[in-house]
Amino acid sequence: QVQLVESGGGLVQAGGSLRLSCAASGRTFSMYDMGWFRQAPGKDREFVARITWSGGNTYYTDSVKGRFAISKDNAKNTMYLQMNSLKPEDTAVYSCAARMQGSSAFSSWGQGTQVTVSS
């Protein structure tokens, strides 16, 4: 498994941007599919975006398509989530997760970073 640490959260006004980072330990980072999830107060955790181990394919939940971009730098053992045109409804704790390629479930999770978007 890999250990994951998120950073880059904060407070931003609606329409602003933030870039989240997810730093991973371990030598096999390049073999992992990675994802971002978020959980707003009183709500279940939801999928935001994911990227395949090679970085060749990305997937997004409908509400962030065209605004968020996920990327992965295997040389730096880091994944990113660029968030543009932020909305108050994007406010949540964002967590990164990893799963070995070919696995169905994300098995490694970070602690999360708070993103707050003010109106």
Image: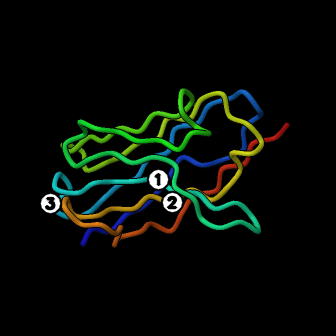
Mark in the foreground, 1 or 3: 1
The residue closer to the viewer here, 77 or 60, is 60
Instruction: Measuring from the top left, give residue 35's x and y in whole percent.
Output: 40, 53
Assign the C terminus to one quadrant of the image. Answer: top right
Q: Which residue is mark 3?
A: 28
Q: Amino acid at mark 2?
A: Ser
N-terminal of the pair, mark 3 or mark 2, is 3
Q: Residue at x 62, y 31 (%)?
A: 17
Residue 54: quarter of image: top left
Q: Residue furthest right?
A: 119
Q: Residue at x 27, y 68 (%)?
A: 2
Q: How many angstroms separate mark 2 from mark 1 (CA)?
A: 6 Å
The residue closer to the viewer here, 24 or 39, is 39
Q: Element under label 1?
A: strand
Instruction: Measuring from the top left, give residue 12's x and y in whole percent.
Output: 72, 38
Circle on res. 36: 1
Instruction: Measuring from the top left, give residue 15's x and y in whole percent.
Output: 72, 27
Are the residues flagged by discs 2 and 1 in contact, CB closer than 8 Å?
A: yes
Q: How many angstroms separate mark 3 from mark 2 (CA)?
A: 20 Å
Instruction: Measuring from the top left, give residue 92's x and y in whole percent.
Output: 67, 55
N-terminal of the pair, mark 2 or mark 1, is 1
Q: In this image, 70 relative to 16: left or right?
A: left
Q: Amino acid at mark 1?
A: Trp
Q: Which residue is mark 2?
A: 95
Q: In the rendered view, would you say 97 is above or below 11? A: below
Are the residues flagged by discs 3 and 2 in contact, CB closer than 8 Å?
A: no
Q: Amino acid at mark 3?
A: Thr
Q: Around disc 2, counting alpha carbons within 10 Å, would you say few (fewer than 14), some (14 to 19), or many (20 or more)? A: many
